[in-house]
Image (tube, rainbow, N blue to C red):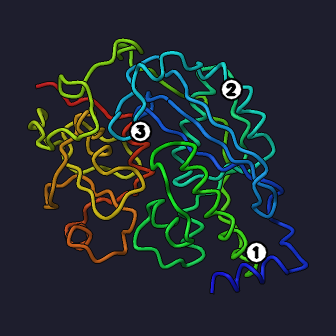
Amino acid sequence: MLEDLTTAALSATAWPAAYPRGYAVVDVETTGLARDDRIISAAVYRLDARGEVEDHWYTTVNPERDPGPVWIHGLTSEALEGAPLFREIAGELTARLTGRVLVAHNAVFDWQMIAREYARAQREAPVRQRLCTIALSKELGLPLPNHKLESLAAHFGVVQRRAHHALDDARVLAEAFRPSLLAAAANNLRLPLHECRPLTEWSDRPAAPRIGQQAGYGGQRPTSWRPSRKRPACPYPNPGRYEPGGRLKQGMRVAFSGDTSTERELLEDRATEAGLHVATSLSRLTSLLVTNDPDSGTSKVVKARQFGTPVVDEAAFGQLLGDVEPASEG
């Protein structure tokens, strides 16, 4: 069916006039998910209006701090020590993004990380529109088991060689985006484009270890294996439920349900580091449920409806993590 759809799109004489002229398929690996986290590698595949690859580019980036979850991205302090700073590669990245729609898997995350790096370099990111391939797959009604890149790749028969390596993730996404774009065009489907407004806010963690002085995870240097998942008790009292539109507060109980595009354990780690209580189940005391599929019938989602627990998706949670309110004293 996919081959028939692709052939039909290729042979169509009329390409939707509202479609963009070119795309920049992007993937960045980072030190984490918060507002003060940094990019450590970036890749861009430039595609023409019909999704054909024009060229690709990749670079590591020195984040000037601890590289974060090495067990996920594989980039150690030693590997990044001689890498260029973001401000040194900003010009090349600008040339590859200008005039194109930024395409990424969970695009709001990649966009915000890139925009903040430009802000630190006292420049403005040259991106005016973004397209999330998760949103596009939903628009197309693709029968995917979850929202992970590997599932999208498997649906289109794309072989993933090095997961969480920016260049290979960008390649996989570019190869999966082309048939998605053709399918959308064949049905004259409106692309889920979003405006990218200039972003100037950013922050840095003042006491962050620097490259060459990498701190280990839990007092040990990260390796290819994952540390024990037993977490220390949250030191802060539960302040109650999250108020939609407000800020998270240290001590809030956060539960996760369903698949996430980011490693679940990394999300949980960042929540714990921010002073939140990561709950394995949902109760009336739960402050917030994070899920990309609020209409699913999982036990946590069902209980959230029963208890009136606030629900946000993964992208919104990532934004909230960047500005967690300190716990009240006393």
Q: Is residue 49 left or right of residue 175?
A: right
Disc 3 marks a residue whose amino acid type is His
Q: Secondary structure at mark 2?
A: helix
Q: Is residue 64 left or right of residue 43?
A: left
Question: In the rendered image, which residue does mark 3 sit on?
Answer: 73
Q: Where residue 235 appears, x then y in whole percent?
A: 11, 32
The reply to whether the C-beta atoms of the residues labelled 3 and 2 are less than 8 Å apart is: no
Q: Where residue 40 appears, x then y in whole percent?
A: 50, 30
Question: In the rendered image, which residue does mark 2 sit on?
Answer: 90
Is residue 15 visible in the rendered image? The answer is yes
Disc marking residue 185: 1
Q: Nearer the viewer, residue 249 or 81?
A: 81
Q: Where residue 1 appears, x then y in whole percent?
A: 63, 87
Q: Residue at x 27, y 57 (%)?
A: 256
Above or below — where is 68 with respect to 162?
A: above
The reply to whether the C-beta atoms of the residues labelled 1 and 2 are less than 8 Å apart is: no
